[in-house]
Image (cartoon, rainbow, N blue to C red):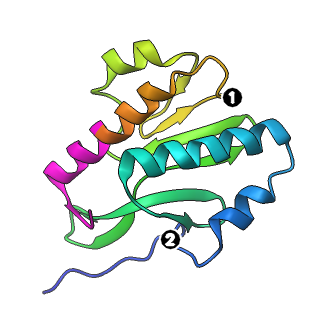
Amino acid sequence: MPPKKIQLKTSKSKKSVTSFLNEIEKETLKKDCKKLLKVFKDASGMKAKMWGESIVGFGEYTYYRANGDEGQFMACGFSPRKSGPTLYIMPGYKDYGDLLKELGPHKLGKSCLYLKSLEGIDLSVVEALIKSGLKDLKKSYKTDF
């Protein structure tokens, strides 16, 4: 039986990334997100697309669930949250401890990196995290990059 394609709640949308970022009310968050847009574009070499209502994503990969169902999701991205920017790298951050030591103030989730702002954050480390995450994702999943 062929795999069933699943549709996630957070899927690619046609909304404009530029419009979305321009709608951010908090000026410091808007400025941080515009900076992150450039960092992610430069590091990934990919065009930004909206995922769901509030995530700016880059690239896609196909994943398979234990039952064989398959889905598509962004390879990396970020989202402006009330608490600050949240960065997403799909293999997760567990193997990037050495880089994270150099990043600056942050909190960690499985595939989420929580920042209060870009103040004190080393953007070259963010770029290295993105590149490492994409490289590692490509080793284990079918990607579009």
Residue occupied by mark 1 = 117
Going 42% across and 40% down the picture, which residue do you hit?
Answer: 111
Q: What is the three-letter code of the residue carrying label 1?
A: Ser
SS class, disc 2? loop
Residue occupied by mark 2 = 11
Residue 10 picture location, percent across and down: 53, 66
SS class, disc 1? loop
Q: What is the three-letter code of the residue carrying label 2?
A: Ser
Location of residue 7 (image quadrant): bottom left
| Residue found farthest to the bottom | 1
**Residue count near mark 1 (Cα–Cα under 10 Å), binned few <14, some 14–19, many ≥20:** some
In magenta, the rendered stretch is 132-145
Determine whether, in the image, residue 141 is placed left or right of residue 14.
Answer: left
> Magenta span has 136?
yes
142 vs 48, nearest the viewer: 48
Up the image or down, 57 lies above or below 88; here it is: below
Q: What secondary structure is the stretch in magenta mostly built from?
A: helix
Which of the marked residues, 2 or 1, is nearer the chain's N terminus? Answer: 2
**Residue count near mark 2 (Cα–Cα under 10 Å), binned few <14, some 14–19, many ≥20:** some
Going 85% across and 42% down the picture, which residue do you hit?
Answer: 26
- Real-space Cα distance between discs 2 and 1? 26 Å
Going 68% across and 38% down the picture, which residue do you hit?
Answer: 32
For the question of whether residue 82 can be seen, the reply is no
Location of residue 52 (image quadrant): bottom right
Residue 81 picture location, percent across and down: 70, 44
| Residue found farthest to the top | 101
Mark number, residue 10: none
